[in-house]
Image (spheres, rainbow, N blue to C red):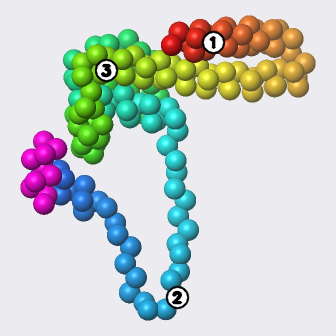
Amino acid sequence: WLKELSLKSRIEEKILAQELTAIKVKTSASSGPEETERTEVVKPSRTDLVCQKLLSLILAKPEFLPSVIPNRGYFPTNWQKFLDNPSLLPPLLDLLSTYEFSDFDEAMLKKELQELIKQLKLEFLKNQGRRLQEEIKSAQKNNDKNLLENTLRKFQAISQEINNLQNNK
């Protein structure tokens, strides 16, 4: 079945086997009451999900990479290395890209690319806005009128940019 999956997904059987061994299945050896382990699952941020999907799209259509490079500054630093070298991406992402974009035609792929870039910019700007809100609170607390005025101006500019992006659907 692994060989069939490899043929259908066009991913090497060796890579699929590695991913399969990475999956840990919990087995219970005791017949007594089960103890539930509390493991905290860290949910990826929206920015991480957008980056993952965008890079997945680049794996499906490598010719889209030049369109993404000018937006490099919107990527968190931990994702920027994949723009330089997409081969560093986990093989599972390649599998996801094959699955997720298999039914898309060229026009749909281009539209998806533009929407993902827009979402990445929005998340970047929203994060900057949250940071500026903290600076505004601090400036108000410290009664620093110059810092407050400058920070409010920056916040207003970011809010306007977010509004412009959201209205240009």
For the stretch drawn in magenta, the main secondary structure is helix
Q: CA distance from mark 2 to mark 3?
A: 51 Å
Residue type, label 3: Met
Query: Toward the viewer: 44 or 79?
Result: 44
Residue drawn at point x = 37 percent, y = 22 percent: 112
Residue drawn at point x = 38 percent, y = 34 percent: 52
Image quarter where the N terminus lies is bottom left
Q: Is residue 134 visible?
A: yes
Camera-near label (3 vs 1) is 3
Position of residue 82 measured from the top left corner of the image (x, y, whole percent): 32, 30
Would you identify the image quadrant in which residue 161 lies? top right
Span of residues in magenta = 1-10
Position of residue 115 measured from the top left corner of the image (x, y, whole percent): 43, 20
**Mark 2, secondary structure of its residue:** loop
Q: Badge 2 local density, few (<14 within 10 Å), some, or many (20+)?
A: few
Residue type, label 2: Pro
Would you identify the image quadrant in which residue 95 lies? top left
Q: Magenta stretch: residue 18 in it?
A: no
Residue drawn at point x = 52 percent, y = 38 percent: 45
Give the vertical position of 91 relative to 136 (above or below). Answer: below
Residue type, label 1: Asn
Would you identify the image quadrant in which residue 93 lies? top left
Please tell me which of labels 2 and 3 falls first in the chain.
Answer: 2
> Which residue corresponds to mark 2?
33
**Mark 1, secondary structure of its residue:** helix
Camera-near label (2 vs 3) is 3
> Which residue corresponds to mark 1?
163
Please tell me which of labels 1 and 2 falls first in the chain.
Answer: 2
> Which residue corresponds to mark 3?
108
Q: Is residue 133 toward the left or the right of residue 50 in the image? A: right
Position of residue 65 measured from the top left corner of the image (x, y, whole percent): 28, 19
Q: Is residue 71 toward the left or the right of residue 1 in the image? A: right
